[in-house]
Image (cartoon, helix red, strand yellow):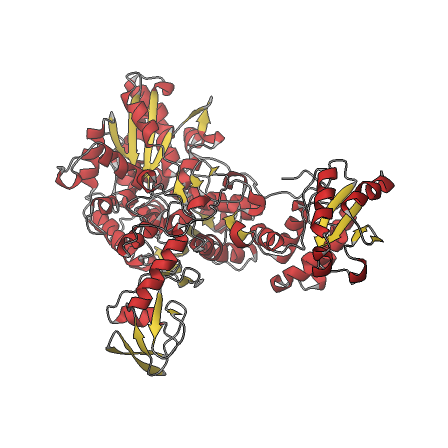
Amino acid sequence: MEIVQLTIDNKKVVVEKGTTILEAAKSIGVDIPTLCYMKLHDTNFENKPGGCRVCVVEVEGRRNLAPSCKSTCEEGMKINTHSVRVVNARRTVMELILSDHPFECLVCAKSGDCELQSLAQNLGIREVKYQGEKNKYKSDESPAIIREMEKCIMCRRCETACNDVQTVGVLSAINRGFESVVAPAFEMDLDHSTCTFCGQCVAVCPTGALTERDSSSKVMDAIVDPNKTVIVNTAPAVRAALGEEFGMDAGTLVTGKMVSALRKLGFDHVFDTDFAADLTIMEEGTELLGRLGKHLAGDKDVKLPILTSCCPGWVNFFEHQFPDMLDIPSTAKSPQQMFGAIAKTYFADQLEKKREDVVVVSVMPCLAKKYECSRDEFKVDGDPDVNLSISTRELAQMIRNANLNFEALEDDDFDQPMGESTGAAVIFGTTGGVIEAAVRTAYEVHTKKTLERLDFEELRGMEGIRSATIDFDGLPINIGIAHGLGNARKLLEDIKAGKSEFHAIEIMACPGGCIGGGGQPYHHGDVEILKKRQRAIYEEDKGKILRKSHENPFIQKLYKEFLGEPCGEKSHELLHTHYYDKKKKIEI
Amino acid sequence: MADIKLPAAKVEELKEVCKKFNNEPGELINVLHAAQELFGYLPAEVQEVVANEMNVSVAHVYGVVTFYSFFSMIPKGEHPISICMGTACYVRGAEKVLDEFKRHLDVKVGETTEDGKFSISCLRCVGACGLAPVVTVGEKVYGRIAPEDVKGILAEYM
């Protein structure tokens, strides 16, 4: 390893050759402000167009200031990261950026969590000397993501997320000069593009240019409507991240406080999506064993691997990009949609309510869930199974609106019957969790033996693509896991080429799985936060008495009283779905 | 998006063009040049075919098409009018001539009249500076044009 020695702010530092000044400074605790730069450790993706010039530093002997994110360290360099010249240059750069930025901070969805805003504060910008033309673009309001490109600073992070990380390829810089803007092809709305609504562009946007469609006021309207019974359910990843919105450490589990807050907000029934996750395992696990059994018996029509289908971003991805493989994913609906289907039938019957008088709200770490619940196949006579899906961030906003002191709330428990869940359901929130939960149940159903070891460490981790072979009492089951759609694409290409050896594959659209979802508190590129959330998820699993989905007593009761058998007739009607070819057809 | 159907034979030709450049994403600009020659312009459908063949996103192709002023998504008129804006023509009043064309046809630079007859574009020097300001309509060159000549030129093609 070749090394170089240099001085940063009078401190000696030794780094590997090729290290950028920004990284070298970071290694000795010197923080250089950045704006367009973003590095997602663990995924090896980096966005450094070197465009914003906020990270400039002074290098002794050089005429010009150097952008530290793109300049590599050289032997004997003497660097000053906060000389008067540097700070003045940063201020000028900021003022130029702000001269074409709407001054709407007070009413902007990103206010308080905006990197541009906090940088302006840190640099003490109190006026913008430069006056000139301001850009105007049409706004784009899809069911999940809203684009307000006047607020864009052309950092291109969303392009990196969409094109490099996710390989979805919806966004590109178009036009040139002052007119340039990041947009889908032909400036079509996201709704008409091949966007999966995974929300990773929103997750990395430093400003308010990309945000979610906020449904929280519609939720409040339903709550105050005396004719409506409002049911809420919360996805597993929400409890591992919500606390961050209230200044708590990343990875703090706030399940009890969250339930308490939801009750105070006025929901009639506070349930858990985890209940539906257990149900998903019953259906998906049964489907896996069914397909596996037929395949091993030599039925050539039965295709393996089976792919999980809980993630709506992933469903959108394969519908758009791999329409010739629609028969491979499991037909099981996602937990959100299973929850809605059961809530508006089984539970509505128990309440003696008509389905249209029941409003189902889900709190999700996800933006694609907003799109999912709007899909026509998840409606009965126009009435959606899930009426509204809000993100973790929107729930936090509702809690702030109600002025609840979140940290001081007492822990509370979910209501029954749809609030009961096992540890297997909680781990749905992280990459590897769904397949681990499926293994716990499928093993016992298949072997009719009790599973001694419940923690499948070989399925856990943050590697983009992972694999493991699990011994089903003499039958080796090959399992693949991918998170991030770019990684999913690699596994799909293998299946297409006939190279895949897997029996089952779990795919999550977002890096990290749901804990890194597009609706979670902003991580601002710090992947350590995702790891802490992941630890919290496994901690919650460990603390549960029941850790296998088929042991959930309310799930057992649901099958006995209402559904019959997993993958039976009623289950097929309510809990399974089909997929559509959404590839854009070129008319010739 | 535009609702234009491309003739199948031309699409095959376009695919051949992509193949000639080994469907290599780095050759995108060259492919688009050839595609524009083939179709006269680059409608959305052409960009989609190119993106599919070269395995790049349509957004990326559109990004390149909109970046370079040479590429156009609007079909040229039956009689494409080009006004030279080179230095010599410019100083001898080309802009006033351009304005007159725009006023008569009620279109902007880069646009085509509704009936598809005329389109206006600007170019930089046709190599006939002695005739400045110069206007070309199709293959025909008009020299020493004054704004008051514009009406007469257009009348030739009405």
Q: Position of residue A207 (x, y in %)?
A: 37, 48
Quadrant of res A473: bottom left
Closer to the camera, A433 or B18? B18
Residue positioned 31% across, 19% down in the render = A228
Closer to the camera, A307 or A429? A429
Res. B63 visible in picture: yes
Above or below: residue A581 compared with residue A206: above
Direction right: furthest residue: B156
Q: Say which quadrant the C terminus of chain A sits in.
A: top right
Q: Position of residue A323 (x, y in %)?
A: 56, 45
Closer to the camera, A395 or A89? A89
Q: Is residue A525 left or right of residue B96?
A: left
Q: Position of residue A50 (x, y in %)?
A: 43, 64
Res. A454 visible in picture: no
Above or below: residue A505 compared with residue A567: below
Q: Is residue A479 left or right of residue A82?
A: right
Above or below: residue B153 compared with residue B69: above
Number of marks? 0
Q: Position of residue A14 (x, y in %)?
A: 29, 79
Residue positioned 34% across, 24% down in the render = A359
Closer to the camera, B12 or B93? B93
Above or below: residue A376 compared with residue A137: above
Q: Say which quadrant the N terminus of chain A sits in.
A: bottom left
Residue positioned 18% across, 47% down in the render = A543
Quadrant of res A562: top left
